[in-house]
């Protein structure tokens, strides 16, 4: 895992501007604390920050290979899980390798197969290859967007980077935000429309896409998409196939030259990863497996079950850790540290995000990093198997918008008439929702309920899952921790996509087919446990901390947020402690305390990033 960035310019001589590329790369040092490198020519510069996971000696980047008259240079972020398979195939075609790194495999695969190489990759990746003779840049991102990649095309200058901060470090890019960017922040946030870079002139390379840039201009192509096909397997075969695909994904993702662990919550998904990982390590004579969980000081005192969080994790974590004899550690976070980390989490994302849900993952990752460099997580099972409460809520299913967005009317009351007129929130939201629905690959002849659920699961995978993947990548990589997500293996996602809803919903349970697939591996009480999301603090001191913080902020005439909000509505929000926004106005975890924290982050972002906008 690493950070990548680069700069192409057809007019200037970049060799005299190395310091700018160094500055861009330095912004990504947390992603790659172990090493760094720069390759520079008159028209192109590629930079890399490295977190060593595989082949410490042979994987240095940018990596350069000469083939005939052409020189190819790669800067790469990710892990390729089918490295050995591809390497053997390339060797049969006469290629020779100087290392055992996946970086070299990706580079030579591009040399051999060109743009179609990405269709052969099973992994998590964002990479750039520059061909100096043809003056051509190739960028690609993994199928599901687990690894980030942004770019900016400004006249004769083309920039790219793993994170927005690397592009913002270039003098050609100013922190300007237009109506679209403000609508993303104040309406869709902390979600983000695929492809949106928020800042004017900056875009995101979408998952499953690649980009070619040369003197003729820019071309973007999609190489992977969900494809709807008739599902021929019966229930038993489907469950066995899910079991097999998940086991294989975990097995492949355990490959590492550095310490590895599992992030354990005691829920179905992370418990399954723990079970498969523990068994695989035992088979190879390795182990024991290390597991980590996160909790909050005094949370057991204040936790109250609700629709989204039916029970606490701690007892379930201990049950699974004991069952598989893992070396387990629970990291406890306290309210002051959580609040203090809100500005850090903002700078890690470069955007307002999931506030304390982000901050806690950053603090958690920092502690995990002390014992491991790679972690496996149960993220994204709910998206592909339909585990969210909104998949079974008739009111939500009949609502004509994204199901994780609630209390929209109440939220709009918080903003100034000038902002609302500028961003046209309801029109913007309807447009983005209809764009998403237009992409859904329906299967001819399927029933109305199957069509409806296919639509909902498509929204889950393409619009909601990126929220969690962005969070996981930024917060973990900020601590120098690589997190892998076996449930996002494309083979598993493709297979699960076409399992009919009646099977996914086996026994009228969320993720019913997954529960069936794991029968015998996990205790029945774990198999029957209701979904519970990532834990958050329920300590009332957190609410009071962020409420008072926000009150001071909004009373400060120099706060840039003031010109974007309705002051009367904001004072009502403060006086009522945002109780109207509980238990969740966004997703499952963001209630009243998180609304205060989100607005705090927005103000910090406007101020510290020196954001400019004009109504």
Image (cartoon, grey):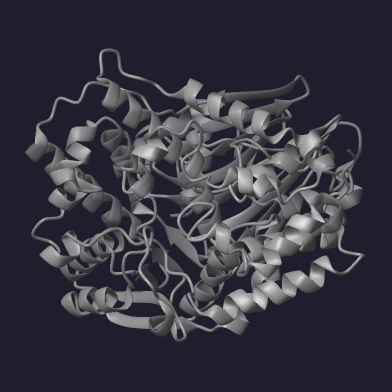
Q: Which quadrant holds residue 427?
A: top right
Q: Position of residue 138 (x, y in %)?
A: 63, 33
Question: In the image, 276: left or right of 524?
Answer: right
Q: Position of residue 396 (x, y in %)?
A: 41, 39
Q: Position of residue 462 (x, y in %)?
A: 47, 37
Q: Residue at x 71, y 62 (%)?
A: 572
Q: Quadrant of the C terminus?
A: top right
Question: In the image, 147: left or right of 395?
Answer: right
Outermost residue toward the top?
Answer: 445
Q: Position of residue 411 (x, y in %)?
A: 65, 49
In this rendered view, identify the residue nearer to me: 132 or 45: 45
In this rendering, is residue 444 above or below 39? above
Question: In the image, 529: left or right of 208?
Answer: left
In this rendered view, identify the residue nearer to me: 280 or 235: 235
Q: Residue at x 50, y 66 (%)?
A: 56
Q: Which quadrant holds residue 259?
A: bottom left
């Amino acid at each position: 895992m690493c950070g990548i960035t680069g700069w192409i310019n057809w007019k200037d001589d970049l060799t005299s501007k190395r310091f700018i590329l160094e500055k861009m790369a330095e912004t990504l040092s947390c992603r790659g604390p172990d090493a760094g490198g720069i390759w520079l020519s008159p028209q192109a510069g590629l930079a890399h920050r490295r977190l060593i996971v595989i082949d410490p000696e042979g994987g240095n980047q940018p990596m350069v290979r000469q083939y005939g008259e052409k020189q190819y240079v790669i800067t790469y972020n990710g892990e390729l899980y089918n490295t050995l398979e591809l390497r053997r195939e390339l060797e049969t075609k006469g290629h020779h390798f100087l290392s055992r790194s996946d970086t070299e495999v990706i580079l030579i695969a591009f040399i051999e197969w060109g743009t179609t190489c990405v269709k052969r990759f099973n992994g998590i990746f964002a990479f750039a290859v520059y061909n100096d003779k043809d003056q051509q840049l190739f960028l690609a991102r993994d199928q599901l967007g687990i690894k980030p990649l942004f770019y900016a095309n400004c006249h004769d200058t083309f920039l790219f980077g793993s994170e927005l901060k690397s592009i913002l470090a270039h003098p050609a890019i100013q922190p300007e935000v237009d109506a679209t960017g403000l609508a993303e922040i104040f309406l869709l946030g902390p979600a983000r429309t695929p492809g949106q870079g928020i800042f004017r002139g900056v875009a995101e390379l979408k998952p499953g896409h690649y980009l070619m840039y040369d003197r003729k201009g820019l071309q973007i192509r999609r190489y992977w998409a969900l494809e709807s096909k008739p599902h021929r397997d019966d229930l038993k075969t489907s469950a066995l196939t899910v079991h097999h695909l998940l086991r294989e994904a975990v097995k492949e993702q355990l490959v590492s030259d550095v310490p590895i662990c599992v992030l354990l919550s005691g829920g179905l998904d992370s418990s399954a990863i723990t079970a498969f990982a523990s068994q695989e390590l035992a088979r190879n004579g390795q182990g024991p497996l290390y597991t980590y969980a996160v909790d909050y000081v005094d949370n057991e005192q204040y936790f109250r079950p609700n629709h989204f969080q039916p029970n606490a994790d701690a007892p379930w974590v201990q049950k699974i850790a004991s069952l598989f004899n893992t070396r387990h550690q629970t990291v406890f976070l306290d309210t002051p540290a959580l609040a203090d980390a809100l500005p850090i989490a903002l700078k890690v994302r470069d955007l307002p995000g999931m506030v304390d849900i982000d901050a806690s993952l950053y603090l958690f990752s920092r502690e995990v990093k002390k014992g491991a460099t790679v972690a496996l997580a149960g993220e994204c099972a709910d998206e592909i198997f339909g585990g969210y409460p909104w998949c079974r809520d008739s009111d939500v299913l009949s609502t004509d918008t994204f199901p994780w967005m609630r209390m929209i009317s109440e939220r709009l009351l918080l903003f100034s008439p000038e902002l609302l007129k500028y961003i046209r929130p309801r029109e913007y939201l309807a447009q983005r929702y209809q764009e998403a629905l237009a992409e859904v690959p329906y299967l001819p002849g399927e029933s109305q309920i199957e069509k409806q659920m296919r639509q909902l699961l498509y929204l889950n995978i393409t619009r909601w899952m990126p929220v969690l993947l962005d969070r996981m990548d930024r917060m973990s990589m900020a601590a120098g921790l690589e997190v892998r997500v076996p449930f996002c293996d494309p083979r598993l996602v493709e297979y699960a996509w076409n399992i009919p809803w009646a099977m996914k919903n086996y026994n009228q349970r969320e993720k019913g087919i997954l529960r069936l697939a794991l029968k015998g591996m996990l205790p029945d009480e774990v198999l029957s446990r209701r979904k519970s999301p990532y834990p958050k603090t329920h300590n009332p001191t957190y609410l009071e901390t962020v409420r008072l913080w926000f009150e001071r902020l909004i009373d400060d005439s120099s706060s840039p947020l003031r010109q974007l909000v309705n002051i009367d509505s904001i004072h009502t929000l403060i006086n009522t402690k945002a109780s109207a926004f509980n238990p969740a106005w966004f997703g499952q975890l963001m209630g009243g305390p998180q609304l205060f924290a989100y607005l705090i982050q927005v103000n910090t972002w406007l101020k510290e990033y020196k954001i400019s906008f004009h109504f």
